[in-house]
Image: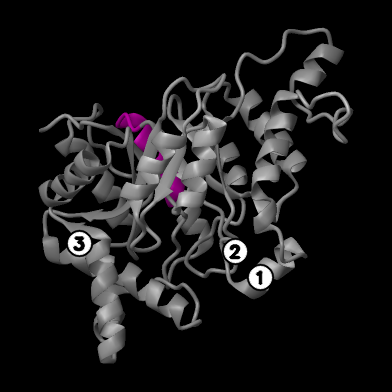
Amino acid sequence: MTPAPFVLSVLDNAHTGVGQTVSEAFDEVISLARLADRRGFRRFWMSEHHAMPAASTASPQLMVARLIAETERINLGAGGVMLPNHAPLVIAEQFGMLDALAPGRIDLGVGRAPGTDPATAAALRRHHQANDQFPQQVLELLGFLNDDFPDGHRYREVHAVPGPWQADQNRVPRPETSPELWILGSSPYSASLAGQLGRPYAFALQFGDADVDSAMRLYRESFRPSEVLAEPYSLVSVPVVADHDPEQARRQAASAAMAMLRMFMRRGYSLLPPDEVEQYPATAQERAILDSYTERFLNGRPEYVADKLDRLHARTGVDEVMLVVMGHSRRAQYRTLELLADHYGLPGARRAPATAGTS
């Protein structure tokens, strides 16, 4: 048992493998959130995706509403909401409702990627310049959350409800808490924006071989203290599969790697069973992609995975590591959290998951 030199959190995208229904996947998301809450993880996030057979999180905020009733202390949130897909006012109101239900426990991570393919993004966004307006959308979102647009702003008389304005109108104290807004990304662009706004920054390592070192350096160099954060605070999300049997961990990671390959080939992001992945007649180029992603998704015995996480922390200096649960098997994802919680000495005793899952 080695205490973690960083805060530990969890990201679950409601992965729904081939042969599993979405209702089964949601039941197991609830089970995993309960485990993360009991074992002392700091946050449990879900991320917005669309038109992906293996990702059932079109609206993380809907799942967060359910998880509020299923957990006691863990922060819940979106990691993240793809803000160009939405009107900032709608997101402010939705997350204001969540914060009213669980004051001080709601995180609102926002990103600019569509979370889907180009055709679906076009159906969601209606105009092709949505990404370019991301900084403006973030500022509008903050304006609605805080109800502090300056005089003369076109939204000065527009108010998010629930929120501070509603409390004033109803002659009650303003809410003591507000959703904690994070900037998400995997590029210097997002790092610089988070620093300039004085907001916590979450870097996603699950998507590819992005330069986390440069992004973290730029975030700290560009950071300006704000009313919510005096010093930089950073998080990196890392895909992991841990098992006492390293071969089983590798098979689950390979299933996730195959989903990435299928997405690149425009065959749909689907999580195939490990046996089916092993039987796939990959070309030399496909094999290189599969092997690369299987290795990138940290997998193996818990001490091996933890060593990789420790090294990443030592290199980047992040404050928090978010474990992105991977693989076809929901039971394997549950086991990953248990094993890493045990390795780092997080509190709580083992308990059988509420749902059986798949092996």
Q: Is residue 168 above or below residue 22?
A: above
Q: Nearer the viewer, mark 2 or mark 3?
A: 2
Q: Is residue 252 visible?
A: no
Q: Give the percent coordinates (x, y) of residue 100.
A: 65, 24
Q: Mark 3: give few (<14), some (14-19) or many (20+) Cα within 10 Å.
A: many
Characterize the magenta stretch by its predominant secondary structure: helix
Q: Is residue 199 above or below residue 248?
A: above
- Quadrant the N terminus occupies: top left
Name the residue nearer the viewer: 57 or 129.
Answer: 129
* Tag 3 residue: 249
- As for residue 234 lying within the magenta part, the answer is no
Q: Is residue 17 above or below residue 40?
A: below
* Tag 1 residue: 120
- As for residue 29 lying within the magenta part, the answer is yes
Q: Which badge, 1 or 3, comes first in the chain's sequence?
A: 1
x 21%, y 31%: residue: 5
Displayed quadrant of residue 144: top right
Q: Nearer the viewer, mark 1 or mark 3?
A: 1
x 23%, y 30%: residue: 346
Displayed quadrant of residue 110: top right
x 71%, y 69%: residue: 122
- Left or right of 313 on screen, residue 79: right
- Quadrant the C terminus occupies: bottom left
Q: Is residue 99 above or below residue 82?
A: above
Q: Secondary structure at mark 1?
A: helix
* Tag 2 residue: 50
- Left or right of 342 on screen, residue 66: right
Q: Amino acid at mark 3?
A: Ala
Q: Which badge, 2 or 3, comes first in the chain's sequence?
A: 2
Q: Secondary structure at mark 3?
A: helix
